[in-house]
Amino acid sequence: MAGLANEEINRIQQAANIVEIIGSYVNLEKQGKNYFCICPFHDDHNPSMSVSEEKGLYTCFVCHKTGNVFSFVRDFENVSFIEAVKIVASKVGIEFETGYKETNKYDKHYEAIELALKFYQNNLKSEDGKKAREYLKRRGITDEIIEEFNIGFAPNSYDTITKLLINKGFDEELLISTGLAARNNTVYDLFRNRITFPIHNPQGKPVGFSSRIYEDVNEAKYINTKETAIFKKGKILFNYHRAQNEARRLKYLLVVEGQMDAIRVYSSGIKNVVATMGTALTEDHIKLLKKLNVKIVLCMDNDEAGEKATIQNGEALSQAGVDLAVLRISDAKDPDEYILKHSKDEFVDAINNAVTYFDFKLNYFKKDKNLNKVEDVSKYINQIVKELNKSNDEVLIDLTVNELSSQYGIDKNVLLNQIIKVEAPKITKIEQKKEKKLSKNQRLASILLYYMMNDTKYIKLYEQELGYIPDDNYGEIANDILAFFLKYNYINIADFITYEISKEYYENVLDIIDTNIKVELNDAEYVGIINKIKIWIDENKINELKEKVKSISDINEQLKIADEIAKIKKRMCQNEES
């Protein structure tokens, strides 16, 4: 773990309550001495992940994800191990400086975007940005909001940011590849005379910009960063990095269309809001939303396009099994305008009265239909029946059929005969980790190492009675467990996992934990395992001696080896009996 101090990482590990940390990401329920949750690492519908506060470990009994608090944060946040340590340290109030510089092939891309962001911010405060500031003020965007969202201003010049960054050592091709510049005959700034809104990835790093006109000019209202190596529009939701913790706290997330809507809602005090930036939700967006394990409230613009977006996004979310509600605002074209015309409290009331996605569709199907006409009534009811055929919710089906029967005077049986019983959805086949085939002896070694990772008395007994495992991988792990104990004078699985972090080694340790997580520690069993491994060592020794005797012609030497083999076999019998 070059560049990282084990002592410091262990200190953070011990200060971090794994239940509190994981509980900040997913909903945990206590069952017995452990906690359980829906596993965020596979398409889970029943709680299959167990979290042990005592051991500082989590494990999923379906997809077999296993690890400590650092590995959970690393995989959930999709960050490096070092970043995960920093995140956990910040959550427990420990300052953590590694002195270790992580390298990423896109570091220069991130650096260029960060410098551009600071330049645009400072430029908004200059005389050059006066009209842009006035426009923002007219829109109700305060200085506090400007600071919170790093809003800036790109000057009305051909190549100011290009020249600035080239002078700082960035080359033209990199600036083009980050979307800050473009090329015609020469390289020029992409964003000119526009208000800039930084776009961050889910980890909070700025990766691009959305820019808006502020004067009445014949140009596109918005110009956004093109798709780049670090900015994939289909993987990013505006404001997600700020909204995720508040969404988990309040158990819901509001999804709006544009960043101005998200900024208005957020600045009014409703911080659990993200924006799609005018695009339909992608599969990657939905994965981000599902990770939060909260209700999603869709609030698209109050126009025909917004209705269609609600249907399109609603279908995608519904098929993904997301708990979904729909908010359709009135007396305003979007949330931004609604809050300015009304108030935060009225908007919160509207959120609280959001309808289910199914109820929204019932109303949507009435659109452009005259329900006093038999033909339109038939079309309407057939659309609803089609929706009911997608559901296996018997209560919803029964209530809807009763309501339609009562409201339109249709025989209930006529409706029920059109509803096909939906089979329960098939469980998606999970990409499972390939289980390593272990020999009988390797299985014994795996159990022995699990014992050693759980209690120092088993380490001491290993050192006294065995001290060696005749397998390179397991032997290395045993040596490192012993080294960890000699260095720190204790053992803890969660801490030991971070003692070495090379990928192959780490996976081997996790395999041992995952395979034996349900093993109940028993002193007599452990002694029996040690004796069986002694037999394994003796079997190897006998095989070596048998090979050796083949190359010896001296009869006396052969007899000595035969005598040694006999002694080993006698010892093996004693170990088998004990």
Image (cartoon, rainbow, N blue to C red):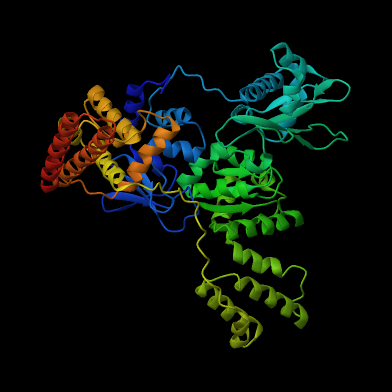
Is residue 343 visible to us here?
A: yes
Indicate the quadrant where residue 496 lies.
top left
Q: In the image, what residue occupies the spot 76% across and 25% down?
A: 176
In the visual, does 120 lie left or right of 440? right
Residue lying farthest to the top in this orientation: 167
Q: In the image, what residue occupies the spot 58% across and 79% down?
A: 401
In the visual, does 500 lie left or right of 81? left
Along the viewing direction, whichever of 159 and 482 lies nearer the viewer: 482
Along the viewing direction, whichever of 344 and 317 lies nearer the viewer: 317
Q: Is residue 273 above or below residue 544?
A: below
Q: Is residue 177 above or below residue 17?
A: above
Quadrant of the frame with the N terminus? top left
| Percent x, y of residue 38 | 43, 53
| Percent x, y of residue 209 | 70, 31
How many circles with numbers are drawn on the protein?
0
Is residue 16 visible to us here?
A: no
Q: Is residue 518 above or below residue 452?
A: below
Q: In the image, what residue occupies the spot 12% across and 40% down?
A: 571
Q: In the image, what residue occupies the spot 78% across and 32% down?
A: 214
| Percent x, y of residue 288 | 56, 45
| Percent x, y of residue 410 | 64, 86
Indicate the quadrant where residue 120 lies.
top right
Along the viewing direction, whichever of 30 and 72 lies nearer the viewer: 72
Q: Is residue 469 above or below residue 36?
A: above
Along the viewing direction, whichever of 93 and 497 lies nearer the viewer: 497
In the visual, does 448 lie left or right of 560? right
